[in-house]
Amino acid sequence: MLAAVCMMLAPAAAHAHGALKSSTPMKGAVLAVVPKEIRLVFNERVELAFTRVELSGPSGKVAMVPVSFAGADRRTVVAPVASGLVAGAYTVNWQIAGADGHPVRGTFAFSIAEGASGLAVAPAVLPGVGSTQPSGVVAPGAPAEQSAPAVHHDPETFPDAGGFNAESPLYVVIRWLQFAAMLVLIGAIAFYHFVLGFLKKKQPPDSPMLRPASQHAARVGLYAAVGLGAVAIARLLAQSYAMHAPGTGFAPGLMWSMIGLTTWGWGWLLQAAGVVGAITGFAAVRRNAAKGWWIATASAVALAFAPALSGHAASAPSLRPLAILADGLHIMGAAGWLGSLLILLVVGIPAAMKLEERQRGPAVADLVNAFSPTALAFAGVTLVAGVFASFIHVGSIPALWQTQYGQRLLFKLGALGIVAATGFYNFRYVRPRLGKVEGVKHIKRSAMLEVGVAVVVLLITAVLVATPTPMDMAAVSGN
């Protein structure tokens, strides 16, 4: 399984999320009339702050007015030509990103015929100037309020992060760490509210196990929140590096423009706010403030929905609000199920094993019996939300084996099947043996296997969220 995951980490030859559907001028066209603008139509709504169009001709780069949308249509980008054009071959380089923030670049060429209508008397070229140069020139019909910030891109160099993008292995690892930290954080909260909540009905209020387990769970959750904050910073740096020209990606002004003007950035801000809230809540619990759990819980809900604003859900071609809802519920379900299992393993069972010897076996049995309905409920949420999200993104059953996204999704489902089968084995065969210390060894071994496979599932998910969906590709035609 691990070898197969490593193969999936290799850069894919698949199309990116956003794709060019058509252009004016068309690819390969020989024009008899000089164009006054470059018009690009994409398969999804694009973020203007990430959009750049550059035109190069016989004498170098052509002066362009900053890009804008074509009216209210956020799939069509217009870049007016600010200077006259001469006959010859031209190349258009473009860059966009959709709501998920994944950068996409492309190029195509066209020609202007000798004797074409509207030719300039002489080349009017500004070498080294691109479409996002600061300029006071405003072409007729180009709405200034829709223009991308002139400072967002380096006007001297068309962005190219050396091949680094959302599918690069390093970026995949960053997302993997993000999902792992979220699983632990939400798992700690689910363990407190549900596992320990059920256990309180069987244990006396002054049980020597409840308070240590609660405090230890808060400590693990605090560590996870701090780790998630560090990963969020790394993710911001990776996104900026992928989006901007070499040497400019870490400029504070560019980062702030990226954060404040895009859906991806709003998702990042939501995650940052969730991290701060979670740290505050868990720290309050450590100071014996019970309300800290509710602060951490509200923050965890925000964290669960933040990835939806920088993933497939945010750029879904239809049912976008429901896709975001399903994505958040899927994360909460998976983290509540597998995260609480991890906390049971590293917090609950060790707390039970510190009791008197005659109490240990029954205490572990009570923990597992409290965890079982929790796992079942969260697994159900995971399944329902995952099936709905798959319906939105896959579109058809054959796409499961005919597309790279579908194949990776099937691989993830297979790994989740192993997790579910291990959980069933624990419930059906291991749980009845509990009550004695010997049974603890069996549950720990099988639970460790379950958590180990869950880690692989997270890695597959980190790859999957950067893979174009079949519905993305179905929207592409033409150019």
Image: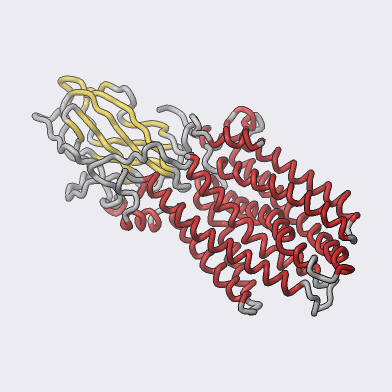
In this rendering, the answer to whether 278 lies above or below 461 is below
Give whichever of 392, 447 is nearer the camera. Answer: 447
| Figure colour scheme | secondary structure
Q: Quadrant of residue 185?
A: bottom right
The image shows residue 406, relative to residue 317, as above or below, that is above
* Residue at the spot 38% in from the left edge and 45% down from the top edge: 243
Residue 255 falls in image quadrant:
bottom left
Nearest the viewer among 199 and 21 is 199
Report the residue at 87% width, 60% height from top: 437
Q: Is residue 353 above or below residue 205?
A: above
Q: Position of residue 106 (x, y in %)?
A: 37, 33
Question: Is residue 395 visible in this depiction of the protein?
Answer: no
Would residue 394 be seen by someone viewing this image from the given angle?
yes
Image coordinates of residue 141 in percent, x first then y, are: 25, 45
Residue projecting furthest to the front: 357
Q: Residue at x 64, y 43 (%)?
A: 456
Quarter of the image that includes the C terminus: top left
Which residue is painted at 84% across and 77% down in the image?
A: 204
Left/right placement of residue 127 relative to residue 212 reads left
- Percent position (x, y) of residue 294? 63, 72
Q: Position of residue 167 (x, y in %)?
A: 49, 39
Locate the N terminus and report the quarter of the image it occupies.
top right
Of residue 370 and residue 302, the one placed in the foreground of this image is 370
Q: Residue furthest left?
A: 121
Quarter occupied by residue 83: top left
Circle count: 0
The answer to whether residue 259 is left or right of residue 213 is left
* For residue 6, side relative to residue 259 (left or right): right
Foreground pick, 429 / 469: 429
